[in-house]
Amino acid sequence: MELEIEKPLNVVFEKLESWIDGFIAMIPNMIVAVLTFIIFLLLAKYGSKIAIKIFSKTSNNTALKNLLSTVVHWSILGLGVFIILGILGLEKAVTSLLAGVGVVGLALGFAFQDIAANFVSGIILAFRKPYRIGDVIEINDVMGKVLRTNLRVTVMETFQGQEVFIPNKELLQGNIVNYSSLTHRQIIIACGISYAEDLEEVESVVRKAILKLEGLIRKDDLIFDYEEFGGSSINFYVRFWIEYPGEPGYLGMKSKAIKAIKKSFDQNNITIPFPIRTLDFGIKGGKTLSEMEIHQAAEDAGQN
């Protein structure tokens, strides 16, 4: 009975003894691993700072700086972990870890592909800089001022006072209209005048009215052109340039121009006609309302 108990105890003691021997043999490697970990902690800390300093010479994008710092920090630490596992003789653990990282990365890539796309788009936009904070832009029928941007979304404030969060992927793939980059903008006003008016006089009156406005730039580029013979008027466009988005604002300047044109037309007896419609009451066409009344009056006279 005692022999039966001693055998398993001997096995346990032998196993513990082998573990202790292995632990003692691993102490030098563990010391080296700890020192290596401390070294890589310092390398990660100072490496991220150096990366930020280098990046700051080319860009002031805070979000991109933070991203670069994080990537460099964890990349150095990750490299240190793999080296430490090798020092401890855990090569199989390194292989398993790499395989696991690959599988997890693939799964996360499918699950968060939209987030990843916006993330990458944010990095590209940070380097391309199609717009800056404070610029007035238009994207996908949304127009407003850029408030802030990060690596996932760009936040805009519309002229109606709402905040709009636009994914960076849409900004990268869409057509961005930046109204602030060139500091000027063209205003286009459409109008129509009566067929009885002198077209040369109308053009002269409109040009004088627009050129008197304050805030006009590139006065030689003012364009007046007749567009078409409309149903009740001869239609024209007037195009001129203003500073943008500085004062006067686009909408305010457009309103002033319309007022100036109307005032000049009134002073020179130029008519902006109302739309004219002709009503046809004949079954087969060709009869006006007045003809129908005369015809009805004639029928009433014959009956009497």
Image: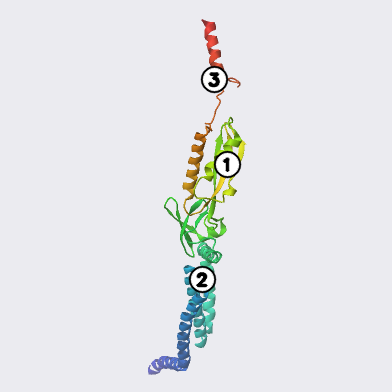
Q: Is residue 269 above or below residue 218?
A: above
**Residue at 53% over, 6% down:** 303
Q: Amino acid at mark 2?
A: Val
Q: Earlier in the sequence, mark 2 or mark 3?
A: 2
The residue wearing badge 2 is 104
User: Please, what secondary structure does the residue beneath circle 2 have?
Assistant: helix
Q: Residues within 10 Å of mark 3 (few under 14, many from 20)?
A: few
The residue under the point 56% across, 17% down is 291
Residue 257 vs residue 301, the one in the foreground: 257
Q: Where residue 229 sits in the image (x, y, percent)?
A: 61, 34
Give amino acid for label 3. Leu
Q: CA distance from mark 2 to mark 1?
A: 61 Å
Of the two numbered discs 1 and 3 on the same chain, state the one appearing first in sequence. Answer: 1
Say what amino acid the circle numbered 1 marks.
Answer: Tyr
Q: Residue at x 47, y 68 (%)?
A: 63
Lower position in the chain sequence, tag 2 or tag 1: 2
CA gap, disc 2 to disc 3? 81 Å
Closer to us: 262 or 55: 262
Q: Which residue is mark 3?
A: 289
In this view, 132 is above or below 70:
above
Mark number, residue 237: 1
